Image: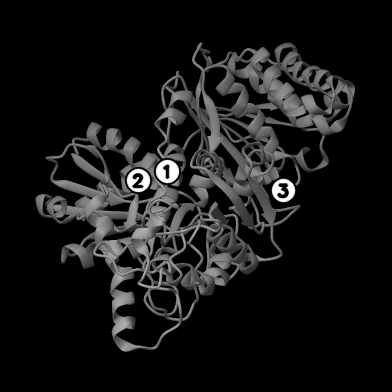
Amino acid sequence: MAADFNWAVGGEAGDGIASTGKIFAQALSRAGRHVFTSKDFASRIRGGYTAYKVRTSVDKVQSVVDRLDVLIALTPRTIEENLDELHEGSVIIYDGERTTMEDVEIPEGMIGLDVPLKRLAEEAGGAIMRNVVALGAACEVTNFPIENLDSALKKNFGDKGQKLVENNKTAARNGQEYVAEEFEVEPEYDLDTTDNDYVLLNGDEAIGMGAIAAGCRFYSGYPITPATDVMEYLTGRIEQYGGHVVQAEDELSAINMALGAARAGARSMTATSGPGIDLMTETFGLVATSETPLVICNVMRSGPSTGMPTKQEQGDLEGMLYGGHGEIPRFVLAPTTIAECFWKTVEAFNLAEKYQTPVYLTADLSLAVTEQTFSPDTFDMDEVEIDRGKLVDEETIGDHMNEKEQFKPHEITEDGISPRSIPGTDGGAHMSTGLEHDELGRRTEETDMRVEQVDKRNRKVDTAREREDWSPREFGSEDADNLVITWGSNEGALVEALDMLDDEGIDVRVVSVPYIFPRPDLSDAVDAAERTVVVECNESGQFADIVEHDVLERVDRINKYTGVRFKADELATEIKQTLEA
């Protein structure tokens, strides 16, 4: 019996693949099992291959692997696409009464279960429930108590009426009973349940939750894959805390609205993906020059141009570090896990206000759309700390006036951080402009003041380097001869790959970097290793270039830019081959 279980449903866009997968993932989570999901979906409303994969275990799982134990195939292509992951004994559930599936051939050594999904769904109340029939069949194959599926069905359909919930329960049982009566399948898998309580959420949802916890009260954005879930999560929730969500007409409007809200004193945020970041770049410079605290979430996808909106890539790194005309101080944070999406969002808001600078919070598609289970105390709200920086009030504002009792919002300070006044503060009226300005915010072309203001803004980064903890996350043996460095969503796959490599006698230290700028000094770690490998999802090795720049040594590279995330067993093989080369 496998230590973990891998299940997938596949078909065409429009077949309800995402909702079917989510229901099964929720059922497993509610049964006290750990869950890690993966999605493969086309960039279109209908047609094109799409799939939803669930890996589950009673132990923590944090990656996908090259194995499928049960596959619900709604199209022949689904079997073809997953053939490399299917193995002897894999179960394929399909509807042979469907015209496209009549002549489907089940690969040798695998178990094909021809279940009349549509007919059984119609008996329960409607053909639209055929995927739920398949879920019932999967429950029978895996000895998974169907009552756990009931609770997930109620969660998804409860607001549409109890009758619909009951119809779906009936559809699931029709599938379960059909398999039990028509096939003599001895289940190889026994999906044990536990009493553990887990939260199931994806990276975009964790970012939204982190924003609310951090005190964000204004969000403006324009729908764009794969960042839209941030806005969808906040809508209807942030209002409960006095906040607002605004869907702008485009990305440029979105960042301008967010800038305005931030100038008014609200913790403010916008989220987008590559093309949206391009449109926001001009205002990004205004945010930095006006020293306005703002969080900009960039959920990366395959590019350039429109690229592949629903595919994985980490190709925006250099754009976030260097994008924009002129020299713009900024911070770039890159959460490495879904849980870190929550905590790094909180940190991003604090950094933005403490240093009065724009902060890029960057996730990638795999991190954003993947659902994973966590213990509720992973997101302990009592641990959230809010730091609004040098925000002045009526009592302290007098320390930041000139001889004419005019407030200096761009005061030259030793640490580079000026006092900040929000509208309504007595004596705090001031102006800001995208033009170079003096301490009062008035435009100037005076050379000495220009130099002082540029130096002041950049000094904030030096101050942050000294005051904040930019440490990376580390796994494996600190004394290992082999060092693997990564960033973003690759961490989970690498952590699981460590055990696989250890089984082969290959000792590896993994350093996962959540801070791109400012970032940790990795010189000592690289010096201590005989071989250094950088793993990332882009073609040019953008983070590897940064590491080489910082440590002045060449590194090996493992790059993937197929649009598909790294898998644990795939990475273990790649690392082994790279070290042996």
Residue of label 3: 13
x, y (%) of residue 470? 27, 49
Quick one: label 3, few (<14), some, or many (20+) residues within 10 Å? Answer: some
Quick one: label 1, few (<14), some, or many (20+) residues within 10 Å? Answer: some
Residue of label 1: 567
Q: Are marks 3 and 2 in contact (CB under 8 Å)?
A: no
Residue of label 2: 571
Quote the CA–CA distance across marks 3 and 1. 24 Å
Residue at 45%, 54% in the rendered image: 361
The quarter of the displayed image where residue 105 is located? top right
Q: Quadrant of the N terminus?
A: top left
x, y (%) of residue 55? 51, 31
Give the camera-side residue of 156 and 416: 416
Considering the numbered disc 1 on the image, is that residue within a helix, a strand or a loop?
loop
Residue at 56%, 40% in the rendered image: 205
Q: Disc 2 marks which amino acid?
A: Leu
Quote the CA–CA distance across marks 3 and 2. 29 Å
Q: Are marks 2 and 1 in contact (CB under 8 Å)?
A: yes
Is residue 445 at all visible to an observer of this figure? Answer: yes
x, y (%) of residue 444? 41, 85
Considering the numbered disc 2 on the image, is that residue within a helix, a strand or a loop?
helix
Q: Are marks 3 and 1 in contact (CB under 8 Å)?
A: no
Give the farthest residue toward the front: 404
Is residue 116 at all visible to an observer of this figure? Answer: no
Quote the CA–CA distance across marks 2 and 1. 6 Å
Q: Disc 3 marks which amino acid?
A: Ala
Considering the numbered disc 3 on the image, is that residue within a helix, a strand or a loop?
loop
Q: Disc 1 marks which amino acid?
A: Lys
x, y (%) of residue 377? 44, 24
Query: What is the number of the mark on residue 223?
Result: none
Position of 139 with respect to 302 (left or right) is: right
Ranked by sequence position, the earlier of labels 3 and 2 is 3
